[in-house]
Image: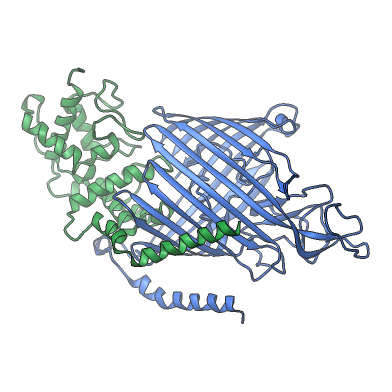
Chain colours: A green, B blue
């Protein structure tokens, strides 16, 4: 018992010693966000942290379940409860606020609906970049669209909300899904990006199984 | 003034020195522009359910309900006050408890100081998983003694919260991995001054390891049983505070491992100690979830000075009074673990939990019964924070086999 207590306390002391002095370890934290990080990148990182961290203990709540002011306080509370850096908690907060304020983000005004006939290969490729980047879709649905614990598979024929058609997916991306972590305009993307990502997901979902 | 008190007051003085700077520091000017500086919100959780005991046990079946409001008051973006009350009505008795009431002070990106009554960072269940909308089961694992625990044997620890100060740190080791550490100083467990021990305060039995053997009450006489109480609202009974800590590694959400320890004296003279070590694992991979904890406790037992001593103890004559000396004679060692496996199937959550509490030992001699329990559960999630939970507890020891039970609960977080 004494030996174990001594070992444990030694580790704790070593830890706090490292925390205050070791530049390499501290740099890992600082690499996550720097002064050059754009708002879109912050929102993307926040979405990934939201997806990875919250599900460790509970089902993540949808951004629309709380007001902006409440999310600010909740993330201050969760910073300690979930053992996050303060900067990480701020990233998650930014993601939640951006998701709740789609109409306030510049470029979010809806453009004319693209019909399936207007969807081009370039639009699909742009959609892939949005899916893997600013839209933060990969964080919950997986990089291969295979789904995860809190989000469904997007490439099979079992659709919980709507269908695999372009217009249906676009409606979901624009409006979100109440009571889930699926936010409207996830990651604070523009309406044009929403159409691109809908085109990409629709293209993958409708691809014949090889 | 003792050296220990001197350290304490120096620490307190330093905290007072840095506090004003912490309160005024604002490193989120964007947020400041949009929101009032201070804010308040009400959150929390609750549930309503029904427990039915099977077999020949004559315990009546009961409805039960729990309501636990959590209040958050933001003083600045580095200062947060949070508190949770818990009201539980079961078997005709309403239990109320101040689960925690603490101030969180964010010193910098890595470190946070907590002061007040907080959930102890010992393993992870107490701190993170005990709310009914987070805990996948209705009952808590049998190693814990409060919050509706229907354990297979006497619990090892209660859901732990205590009064004191805590320092928490996070260091990143990768993009989504980190090493975390917490150290805390709190009041620690005490032996209640009377025979009655308040279950709300998370008492655990200082088990009468053999007939006639109970734990020490340093100046009192032997009672029916000596119980240790954690997180009591009464003052501490000695100068020896509980010191503990936890260190862990996590790669979210795939794995998180923690090792914890704590130790404190619990009698008035500070001679008798209670210590505990713990290890925990949490893992999520695709739709699978795995969670488990191991706990081992050591509790000193005093040497009784009574005319009818337990044979293996060195008793001294004491004129017939059942008085205990303060010298620890032996230590009761207990241990146990629980492990839980779940699989998320759309809105369904089938879960399985195995709990085992080993025989308690005094000097290698078995003195308490082993307990084993299998729990089967099935949850249906209407919303991310609203679930209907079913549970079937199967006790596998002969003396508890008639205490199997089924339970249903509607649990929600708000």
Residue B87: in sight, yes or no? yes
Vertical placement of residue B60 versus B24, above or below: above
- The residue at the point 7 percent across, 29 percent down is A121
Q: Quadrant of the C terminus of chain A?
A: top left
Residue placed farthest to the right in the image?
A: B319
Q: Nearer the viewer, residue B412 or B263?
A: B263
Q: Position of residue B300 (x, y in %)?
A: 71, 58
Q: Quadrant of residue B143?
A: top right
Residue B384: in sight, yes or no? no
Q: Position of residue A119 (x, y in %)?
A: 8, 28
Left or right of residue B32: residue A109 = left
Left or right of residue A110: residue B384 = right
Q: Quadrant of the N terminus of chain A?
A: bottom right
Q: Position of residue B401 (x, y in %)?
A: 71, 30
- The residue at the point 10 percent across, 33 percent down is A125
Q: Nearer the viewer, residue B132 or B91?
A: B132
- The residue at the point 48 percent across, 48 percent down is B128
Left or right of residue B274: residue A204 = left
- The residue at the point 73 percent across, 50 percent down is B363
Q: Position of residue B345 (x, y in %)?
A: 41, 27
Q: How many marks?
A: 0
């Amino acid at each position: 018992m004494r030996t174990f207590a001594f070992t444990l306390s030694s580790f704790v002391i070593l830890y706090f010693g490292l925390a205050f002095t070791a530049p390499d370890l501290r740099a890992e934290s600082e690499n996550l966000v720097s002064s050059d990080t754009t708002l879109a990148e912050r929102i993307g990182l926040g979405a990934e942290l939201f997806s990875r961290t919250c599900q460790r203990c509970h089902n993540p709540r949808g951004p629309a379940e709380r007001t902006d002011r409440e999310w600010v306080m909740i993330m201050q509370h969760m910073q300690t409860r979930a053992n996050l850096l303060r900067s990480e908690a701020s990233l998650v907060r930014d993601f939640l606020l951006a998701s709740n304020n789609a109409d306030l983000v510049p470029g979010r005004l809806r453009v004319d609906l693209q019909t399936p006939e207007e969807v081009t290969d370039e639009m699909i490729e742009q959609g892939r970049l949005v899916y893997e980047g600013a839209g933060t879709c990969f964080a919950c649905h997986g990089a291969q669209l295979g789904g995860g614990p809190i989000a469904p598979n997007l490439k099979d024929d079992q659709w919980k909300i709507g269908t695999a058609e372009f217009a249906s997916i676009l409606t979901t991306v624009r409006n979100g899904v109440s009571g889930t972590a699926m936010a409207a305009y996830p990651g604070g993307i523009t309406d044009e990006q929403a159409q691109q990502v809908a085109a990409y997901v629709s293209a993958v979902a409708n691809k014949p199984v090889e | 003034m003792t050296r220990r008190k001197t350290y304490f007051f120096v620490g307190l003085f330093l905290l007072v020195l840095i506090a004003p700077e912490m309160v005024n520091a604002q490193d989120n000017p964007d947020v400041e522009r949009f929101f009032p500086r201070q804010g308040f919100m009400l959150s929390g959780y609750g549930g309503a359910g029904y427990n039915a005991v099977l077999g020949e046990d004559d315990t009546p079946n009961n409805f039960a309900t729990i309501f636990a409001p959590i209040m958050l008051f933001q003083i600045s973006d580095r200062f947060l006050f949070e508190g949770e009350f818990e009201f539980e009505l079961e078997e005709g008795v309403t239990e109320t408890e101040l689960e925690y009431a603490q101030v969180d002070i964010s010193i910098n990106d890595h470190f946070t100081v907590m002061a007040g009554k907080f959930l102890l960072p010992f393993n992870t269940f107490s701190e993170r998983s005990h709310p009914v909308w987070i805990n996948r089961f209705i009952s808590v694992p049998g190693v814990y003694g409060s919050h509706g625990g229907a354990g297979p044997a006497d619990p090892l620890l209660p859901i732990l919260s205590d009064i004191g100060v805590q320092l928490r740190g996070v260091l990143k080791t990768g993009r989504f991995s980190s090493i975390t550490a917490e150290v805390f100083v709190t009041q620690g467990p005490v032996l209640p001054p009377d025979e009655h021990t308040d279950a709300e305060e998370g008492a655990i039995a200082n088990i009468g390891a053999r007939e006639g053997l109970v734990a020490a009450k340093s100046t009192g006489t032997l009672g029916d049983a000596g119980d240790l109480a954690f997180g009591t609202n009464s003052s501490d009974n000695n100068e020896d505070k509980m010191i503990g800590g936890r260190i862990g590694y996590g790669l979210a959400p795939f794995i998180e491992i923690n090792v914890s320890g704590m130790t404190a004296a619990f009698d008035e003279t500070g001679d008798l100690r209670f210590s505990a070590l713990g290890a925990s694992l949490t893992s999520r991979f695709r739709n699978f979830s795995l969670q488990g904890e191991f706990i081992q406790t050591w509790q000193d037992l005093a040497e009784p000075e009574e005319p009818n001593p337990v044979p293996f103890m060195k008793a001294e004559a004491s004129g017939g009074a059942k008085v205990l000396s303060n010298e620890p004679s032996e230590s009761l060692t207990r241990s146990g673990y629980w492990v839980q496996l779940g699989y998320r199937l759309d809105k369904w959550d089938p879960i399985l939990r195995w709990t085992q509490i080993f025989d308690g030992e005094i000097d290698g001699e078995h003195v308490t019964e082993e307990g084993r329990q299998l729990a089967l559960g099935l949850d249906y999630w209407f919303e991310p924070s609203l679930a209907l939970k079913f549970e079937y507890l199967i006790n596998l020891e002969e003396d508890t086999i008639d205490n199997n039970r089924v339970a249903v609960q509607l649990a929600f977080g708000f």
